[in-house]
Amino acid sequence: DIFPEKFQNKTNGVTQRRWLAQCNPPLASLITETLGTEAWVTHLDLLQGLREHAEDEAFQQKWSEVKKKAKTKLALMLQDLNGGAEVNMDAIFDVQVKRIHEYK
């Protein structure tokens, strides 16, 4: 039998909000601009405020532009790392990162 209630996630203290704020500053800026506050970085529930902008075409356009810039940045890095091999920007990028601890 599987006991999902026994699963416990342990984190090193970097919350998804702080991670987003640091790894994707343009997206963090758009979120801050849209919500009118940086408080979302420490209060996850404030991100629910983005729901009221979900149907706003101007917000959707800005969101798409931020995503495209980040994807282009990653594609250029991948191209660099792979000897100039072209990266298909129409492909779905699925990236997983695992930090290797120095003591392991």
Image (cartoon, rainbow, N blue to C red):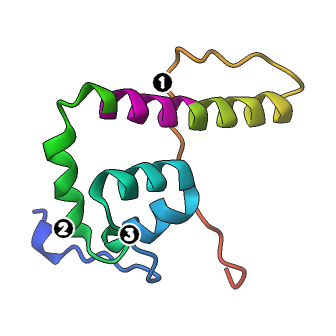
- The answer, for residue 30, to whether it is visible in the render is yes
Rendered image: mark on residue 45? 2
Residue 4 in the image: x percent, y percent?
A: 14, 66
Tell which tag, 1 or 2, sits nearer the viewer: 2
| Left or right of residue 74, residue 57 in this image | left
How many numbered badges does the structure rendering display?
3
Look at the numbered disc 3 and give the secondary structure of its residue: loop
Look at mark 3 in the image and give the residue it sits on: 38
Point out the residue furthest to the right here.
83
In whole angstroms, how far apart are the C-alphas of marks 2 and 3? 12 Å
Rendered image: mark on residue 79? none
In whole angstroms, how far apart are the C-alphas of marks 1 and 3? 30 Å
Figure quadrant of the N terminus: bottom left
Q: Are marks 1 and 2 in contact (CB under 8 Å)?
A: no
The local crowd at label 2, few if under 14, some if 14 to 19, many if 20 or more residues have their Cα within 10 Å, is few
Three-letter amino acid code at disc 1?
Ile
Q: Is residue 13 placed above or below 4 in the rendered structure?
A: below
Look at mark 1 in the image and give the residue it sits on: 92
Which is more N-terminal, label 3 or label 2? 3
Q: Quadrant of residue 101?
A: bottom right
Q: Is residue 97 placed above or below 94 in the rendered structure?
A: below
The local crowd at label 3, few if under 14, some if 14 to 19, many if 20 or more residues have their Cα within 10 Å, is some
Q: Give whichever of 70, 8 is nearer the camera.
A: 70
Is 67 in the magenta? yes
What residue span does the magenta drawing correspond to? 59-68
